[in-house]
Amino acid sequence: MLNRTLYFLRRFLLPQWLYFGIVILTGLVAAASSGLGIPLMIKFVFPLVFRSPGAPPELLTLCPALEHLAPATILLLACGSLPALFLIRGVAQWSNAYMVNYLGIRILEDLRMTIFRRVQELPLSFLEREKKGDILSRITSDTANVQNILGTIANDLIKQPITCASACAAFIYLLFSTGQGLLLLVNILLIALAAWPIIIFGKRISNRALQAQRSNGALNSVLQQNLETQREVRAYGMEERQIRQFRRVADGICTAIIKLVKYQRGIIPIIETVSSLALAFLLVRGRQAGMSLPDFMAIAGALFFLFDSMKRAGNAYNRFNEAQGSLHRLAEILFTPNPLRDPEQPQHLSQPVRGELELRGVSFRYSPEAAPALRDIDVHIPAGQIVGLVGPSGSGKSTFAGLIPRFYDPSEGSVRLDGTDIRRITQHELREHISLVGQQALLFNMSIRENILLGKADATDDELRRAAEAAAVTPFLSQLSGGLDSPVGEGGNQLSGGQRQRVAIARTFIRNAPILILDEATASLDAESEHDIQQALDRLALGRTTLIIAHRFSTIRAAQRILVFERGRIIADGSHDTLYASCPLYRELYDRQGIAES
Ligand code: ADP
């Protein structure tokens, strides 16, 4: 926990040292003017006003120069010093609060950017394992929580202990100057008594806070999933079930927060009771020792600031513990080891990239404890070959295709592109040469033109037109008032599934990468769209190394070669005719689908 906290302080607080320095300085002035300034003022300055006949006030004995001033001037100075002190205190407190917030906002931005950047490079296996809503909640709610706490560290965890220390200094000085050593002893015991719950509750608070933040993440994922699947929820009458699930998670948050508040608020009454004991004892001793009112008031003032700052510091410490829950969840993202690092000295592929692929001795598991999703794969795919990947569901086809753009690295063996191990080149360079078309074309909330140009930002108008034509985008443009500049809506929801897929294919055409991976690109389309898009895909595949993950045999009619997968192994490799004659699994899959489609 300490290491993690130190990392966060070093990484996010240290770069802001200048603002942090101003926070400490203003905090110091505000704290000293309260903890030290007010008790000493009561002791030294007030007696200048209420002086008893014949007894020189202490300030006059400490500072004889004041003797020569006219009594009216002394009175004016004495009365004026109070607003002056409060002015200094007020300005310092305001600047302190302003700078703390400024610092907090800068830190929040830095923290969010760091986490977001990290999410872009995290292994897909991590992102697939975690729920999207939970990751969202870490980036928004947990970072805001940490911002809060870093603000508190910068403010109260520094200002309050300083106030406490200065009040302590004033307190000790006042006790010794009035000969009240016993009061010091008693108060040391009382301070220890007040500090005890702060320490005890700390751990419980951080546990409950972690629980609350986890439930918060779970709530977000339930909500996100619910919003994404509204059609299914209504079609299957799942509303009540979803409400129950939401309530269960929301109840979890309530329970954790209620427990959190119980401990957080617990220290305040304890410290207040202890401080009233200290005051009562001071009254008794003051009376016994015949203490003067200014002495009593000064010591009581110091006591007040001592316990009050302790209470506030304890509160800040609680909040610090509360943020530990969020720090823990952010650390899971920040410290997740990334096995997919780029090499220190990357090689470059020789140009032009041909797209020859070779997998040697490849095995792969999604996690060390999982069964291998791929085993002993040895396959060579010459440049420009169109290959169909066939096999029962869960046999490893998508995993195989995912190894080519390095979404995962093989647990054993290597993948080579044009003879170079793909771990020796940067992921950016590798992925520049690969295009993917999946089942659901994902478009960004921009115009059709901008979506196509994502494939090649500097494409000419002529290239754009040719890509739109080849992908059969042109025919439906006339139905849209804005043509190529029509917006597609969030995720492309203003277009039909077939239109979205065509735009995605146009993007792939313009990208012109030598390797193409098609994963069920026509699965969710109606027969007419499927026909047009299949033709567009056939044109796209021409001359490229193409892997077609086929759940339906109609999608691999252009394949020159077919790899048959079963339980993570390639059990047969050849043309349709050879496989149909020699591979019983292939024949069975083919015939079964023939029956299903007829
Ligand atoms: P196919 O594409 O042939 O249907 P996959 O390659 O998707 O098969 O899956 C192969 C095996 O790996 C299956 O047992 C599947 O459960 C497992 N698997 C797939 N994706 C993941 C994942 N993200 N995490 C863990 N296991 C996975």
Image (cartoon, rainbow, N blue to C red):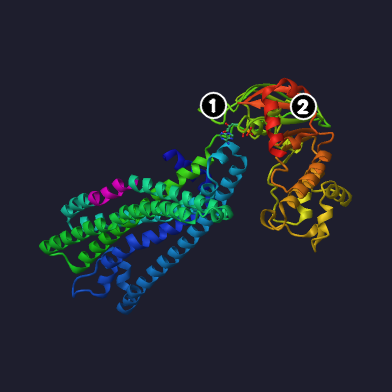
View extreme (bottom): residue: 72
Q: What residue appears at the point 73 percent right and 23 percent down from the top-left corner?
A: 573
Q: Which residues are magenta?
A: 191-202
- Secondary structure of the residue carrying numbered label 1: loop
Q: Is residue 143 visible?
A: no
In the image: residue 144, left or right of residue 466: left
The Cα atoms of the two marked residues, 1 and 2, are separated by: 30 Å
In the image: residue 26, left or right of residue 462: left
Secondary structure character of the magenta stretch overall? helix
What is the three-letter code of the residue carrying label 1? Ala
In the image: residue 550, left or right of residue 255: right
Q: Earlier in the sequence, mark 1 or mark 2?
A: 1
Q: What residue appears at the point 69 percent right and 58 percent down from the top-left corner?
A: 489
Q: Is label 1's Cβ within 8 Å of ligand 1?
A: yes
View extreme (right): residue: 462
Indicate whether 532 appears above or below 485: above
Q: Position of residue 405 (x, y in %)?
A: 69, 34
What is the three-letter code of the residue carrying label 2? His
Q: Please tell me the numbered disc located at residue 186.
A: none
Using the image as rendered, state which of residue 470 and residue 352 is in the foreground.
Answer: 470
Q: Please tell me the numbered disc located at residue 576.
A: 2
Residue 448 placement: quadrant: bottom right
